[in-house]
């Protein structure tokens, strides 16, 4: 028993496993496709289901190898499958398709097409940077299942059952497509609203700043992030925040909270007081619960940063020599999640001329199944690497380095200031 346990542990750790052999031994029909939808590899079950040899498939464009039945003007197999695969490429999320009729040409009788039914699932395979490097296309053939269930009730009813299955699958697919279109419309409206409420800030009098807002790619989780800069005669207040939720409601809450914090920053003695006022206001705003925000007051004459955080990721301060410090000494729970009578913390640190201050929301650093410290270190490395760039160029470089092209499920707000 002990020896078997040691062997199992060795295998789980990955040493000596022939993953190619595992792939070919999978009982389900599986194909690996390039982002251009070219077959890179197929397993034995896929060859058996398709009735093709490996040489007839690998290296070919998917829809050249398996086109629609030219004798069926109503065929939609290639259209539906292409849409699903392209959706996976854009969103980085798996897509389970409804039952599909997708006829296959008989390999032994050219021009003769076999009526076939399939249940496909398309899954992204990610590269280390989070982009979609491959598409895993798994299909389960259900043709015999449909016919067998229909055969028990007679040949005529068998055909009727096949038609019923297929019709219901088509209806489900059409409903899903209408939902996607509705979500896409809501996303577009929410983004326009977000853009209207996040105008470019008025240029600072003596210092350079850059702001960015990047929505999550093809996702509904947008329009909760904001930034704000308030330039006063003796100081500048800069803040970012993140509303829980997405879409039009989150955009509306974001606009209210951003305006409230901006107003408070004009009169507050420091960032803790500004966030305290925001917290009090947030109690009257439905949907503002658990919002995170961080505020930094810059004293240009005293060369100091005073900051306070309501559950938000810490701002980053990069010195001219590349040393990065995270401002994490004054963190409190998010809005609405702290004791009412407790004083909100506030901390102060000095800065040197030429340093860079970066405020951001969690979409810049957080990734699923990854510790947040990994994302913070990635930010520190990128900031140190690009620290000499002007704020506009630096903001673009940080987004390019830290946000993968697909698969990000949260939006990002970013502020970069040259101190």
Image: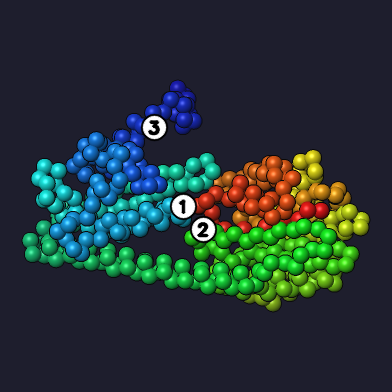
Q: Number of marks in the image?
A: 3
Question: Circle 3 is placed at which residue position?
Answer: 19
- Residue most extreme to the bottom: 284
Q: Which mark is residue 217?
A: 2
Left or right? Give the position of 192 relative to 354. left
Pointers 1 and 2 in contact (CB under 8 A)? yes
Pointers 1 and 3 in contact (CB under 8 A)? no
The residue at the point 64 percent across, 46 percent down is 375
- Residue most extreme to the top: 3
CA–CA distance between discs 2 and 3?
32 Å
Question: Is residue 198 among what the camera can see?
Answer: yes
- Residue most extreme to the right: 302
Closest to the observer, 292 or 417: 417
Q: Which mark is residue 92?
A: 1
- Residue most extreme to the left: 155
24 is higher (above) or lower (below) than 376: above
């Amino acid at each position: 028993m002990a020896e078997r346990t040691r062997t199992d542990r060795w295998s789980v750790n990955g040493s000596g496993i022939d993953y190619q052999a595992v792939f070919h031994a999978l009982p389900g029909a599986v194909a690996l496709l390039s982002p251009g939808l070219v077959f890179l590899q197929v397993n034995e079950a896929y060859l058996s289901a398709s009735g093709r040899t490996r040489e007839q498939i690998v290296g070919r464009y998917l829809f050249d190898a398996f086109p629609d039945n030219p004798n069926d003007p109503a065929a939609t197999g290639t259209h539906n499958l292409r849409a699903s695969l392209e959706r996976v490429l854009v969103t980085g999320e798996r897509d389970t398709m409804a039952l599909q009729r997708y006829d296959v040409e008989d390999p032994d009788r050219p021009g003769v097409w076999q009526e076939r039914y399939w249940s496909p699932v398309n899954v992204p395979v990610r590269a280390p940077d989070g982009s979609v490097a491959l598409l895993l296309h798994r299909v389960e053939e259900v043709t015999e299942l449909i016919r067998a269930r229909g055969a028990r009730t007679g040949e005529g009813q068998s055909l009727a059952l096949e038609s019923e299955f297929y019709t219901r699958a088509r209806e489900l697919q059409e409903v899903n497509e209408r939902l996607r279109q509705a979500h896409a419309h809501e996303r577009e409206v929410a983004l326009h609203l977000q853009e209207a409420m996040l105008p470019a800030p008025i240029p600072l009098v003596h210092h350079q700043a850059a702001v960015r807002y990047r929505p999550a790619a093809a996702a509904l989780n947008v329009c909760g992030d904001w930034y704000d800069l308030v330039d006063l005669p003796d100081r500048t207040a800069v803040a970012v925040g993140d509303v829980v939720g997405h879409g039009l409601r989150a955009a509306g809450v974001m606009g209210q909270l951003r305006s409230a914090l901006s107003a408070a920053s004009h009169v507050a003695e420091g960032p803790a007081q500004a966030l305290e006022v925001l917290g009090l206001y947030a109690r009257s705003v439905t949907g503002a619960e658990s919002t995170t925000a961080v505020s930094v007051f810059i004293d240009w004459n005293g060369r100091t940063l005073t900051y306070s955080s309501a559950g938000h990721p810490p701002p980053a301060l990069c010195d001219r020599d590349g040393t990065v410090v995270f401002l994490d000494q004054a963190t409190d729970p998010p809005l609405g999640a702290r004791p009412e009578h407790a004083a909100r913390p506030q901390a102060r640190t000095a800065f040197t001329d030429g340093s860079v201050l970066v405020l951001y929301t969690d979409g810049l650093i957080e990734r699923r199944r990854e510790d947040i410290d990994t994302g913070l270190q990635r930010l520190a490395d990128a900031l140190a690497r690009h620290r000499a760039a002007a704020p506009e160029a630096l903001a673009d470089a940080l987004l390019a380095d830290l946000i993968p092209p697909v698969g990000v499920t949260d939006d990002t707000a970013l502020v970069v200031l040259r101190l």
